[in-house]
Amino acid sequence: MRRITTRQLTFAAMFTALAALLSIYPFTFYLPDSSRITFREIPIYLCSFALGPVWGGLCAFVSDVIGTFISNSGNAWNPMFSLSAVLTGVLPGLLFRFVFKKEKLTLATTLSIVPVNIAVSLFLTALWFQILGYTGGMPFWAYLLIRRLWLVAVMTVIQITVVRILYPVVLKGIQGGKNA
């Protein structure tokens, strides 16, 4: 078993705090259809890529719980959305570290984020909204294609770009300034 360094724990805590902070009002834009534009996934992806899928999942779960409780949106904590958060933290790390580890950084980042955003942000979140009745009476597929698809597509491009730019810097910081 690998030892956890103080530096890794510190970075995981910073990613968690940043993700929780990015999930509250000034950094989140709520749309009329119960959707929101948020950048909270970026630190979760960075944590998952740099520290591994377990840390990414823990970061996502803790930031989801903290973000829910400090948010002024009026929403209660929901385990379905926490499951989505954990999957958002675990799956990209698994893909990045074990499936696409030999690919160029831009391709590995893209191939690790896109399937997770399609599966979790697009389908699973639309399913949770359908179950909770937040779709305004729209059928599942109509809600998914009309209300969620454009949002997930735009956010995916932003996430890939920011993660691709910040990952080498984060990795260098975690490794203590050694060459990445």
Image (spheres, grey):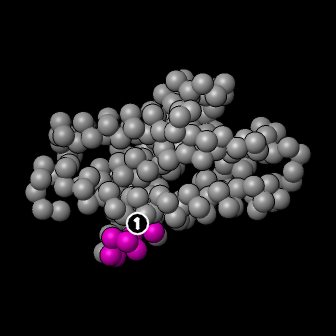
Out of 174 and 33, give the one closest to the viewer: 33
In the image, is residue 104 part of the stretch drawn in magenta? yes
Q: How many labels were placed on the picture?
A: 1
- Relative horizontal placement of residue 52, taking residue 146 as reference (left or right): left
Judged from this view, the residue extending furthest toward the left is: 178
- The residue shown at (25%, 37%) is 9
In the image, is residue 75 part of the stretch drawn in magenta? no
Please provide percent x and percent y for residue 1.
21, 46
Q: Quadrant of the C terminus?
A: bottom left
Please provide percent x and percent y for residue 42.
44, 50
Please provide percent x and percent y for residue 178.
10, 57
**Is residue 119 visible in the rendered structure shown here?**
no
Please provide percent x and percent y for residue 36.
64, 44
- In magenta, the rendered stretch is 103-110
Q: In the rendered image, which quarter is residue 149 located in?
A: bottom right
- Relative horizontal placement of residue 12, taking residue 149 as reference (left or right): left
- The residue shown at (79%, 54%) is 143
Q: Within 10 angstroms of label 1, few (less than 14), some, or many (20 or more) residues?
A: many
Q: Which residue is mark 1?
A: 109
- The residue shown at (83%, 59%) is 142
